[in-house]
Amino acid sequence: MPAMTARATTIEELAERMSRFRSAESARRGLNIQVRPDDVFIATYPKCGTTWTQQIVHQLRTGGSMDFEEICAVVPWLESAWDMHQDPDADQDWKPRAFKSHLDWERIPKGGRYIHVLRDPKTALVSFHRFFEGYVIEPGAIPLDVFVRQWVMSGTLSGRIWEFVVSWWRRAADPAVLILAYEDMVADPLATVRRIAEFLDLADRHRIEVAVTNSTREFMARHRRQFDDHLLRAAIDPRMGLPPGGSSAKVQDVGSTSALSHDVEREVEEMWAAIVTPATGFETYDDMRVAVAAGGSDPR
């Protein structure tokens, strides 16, 4: 176990901590599962509605069960399950098997069904920074703009959000892939749950109703500990050299008060123009979101 136990105060320290986040064996085990045709992979970039979608899927497949210690105990994180003392290829107590993942299309195991949630990069990156503060980063030590410029733009464990978006958008016409927009999930939760239920062949009235009720922010906030990564942290924090305590809650009471500077916001938009637009034809995130609502049409 590393002798030092402290949260990162610089980008270099953040990179060093995150280099110990996942074991090679855990990644290997996750990538080599024997995929079943009805397996469901919730594949998102970090802070793009992953936990929320895990809860929706689990509520639909169980008809409303909250009998779990933490959501990743029943919807395992594919790449990290082995580190959490789970066999990612084992049977699950409910069908279909469901997994969380932060893998792009090129790396994720093939042969199942996939739910990908998009989110405006500007708000996703603010949420990413907020989540890391007090967990991996010492609060106030690494400003938001520095985090985005020196960590996200250079590539996290999940790569960069712009290439991630392109990777999944290229599968928009695949009937085994459902693409949603986080902002539309917020605007119309019932329509979102119906789309997921239809995609998973679980579209009966009771399942939909209970999944809507049990996936509201208010409901999940009342069950906060079931969505806070405490099982993952117990397994990996000592290896990462992180001190006990701190927050890794996925359900926040209010939105972040942080905001990107105008310069960094422009740089984030420029990354979209340089990477996403040439590959997809969408000049802005909002243009892509409109296409998602229309069923994934490509403007080219």
Image (cartoon, rainbow, N blue to C red):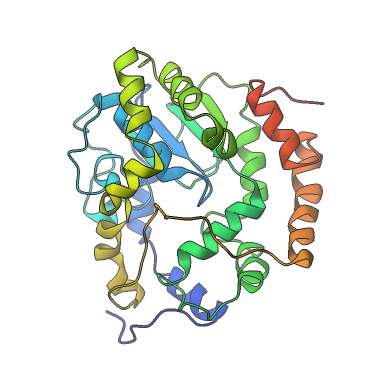
Q: Indicate the position of residue 56 as horizontal and vertical percent values.
A: 37, 32
Q: Quadrant of residue 32?
A: top left
Q: Is residue 288 above or below residue 225?
A: above
User: Which residue is found at the position 48% from the left and 40% from the top?
Assistant: 43
Quarter of the figure with the N terminus: bottom left
Quarter of the figure with the C terminus: top right
Hey, which residue is sitting farthest bottom in the picture? 3
Q: Is residue 159 above or below residue 33?
A: below
Q: Is residue 3 left or right of residue 263?
A: left
Q: Indicate the position of residue 293 as horizontal and vertical percent values.
A: 64, 25
**Residue 152 visible to an observer of this rendering:** yes
Q: Is residue 160 above or below residue 120?
A: below
State the residue in front, 126 or 258: 258
Q: Is residue 243 left or right of residue 180?
A: left
User: Which residue is found at the position 39% from the left and 30% from the top?
Assistant: 40
Q: Indicate the position of residue 94 as horizontal and vertical percent values.
A: 22, 28
Hey, which residue is sitting farthest top in the picture? 204
Q: Indicate the position of residue 158 as horizontal and vertical percent values.
A: 53, 54
**Residue 96 visible to an observer of this rendering:** no
State the residue in front, 94 or 27: 94
User: Which residue is found at the position 73% from the left and 67% from the top?
Assistant: 261
Query: How many numbered circles are shown?
Result: 0
Q: Is residue 72 above or below residue 131?
A: above
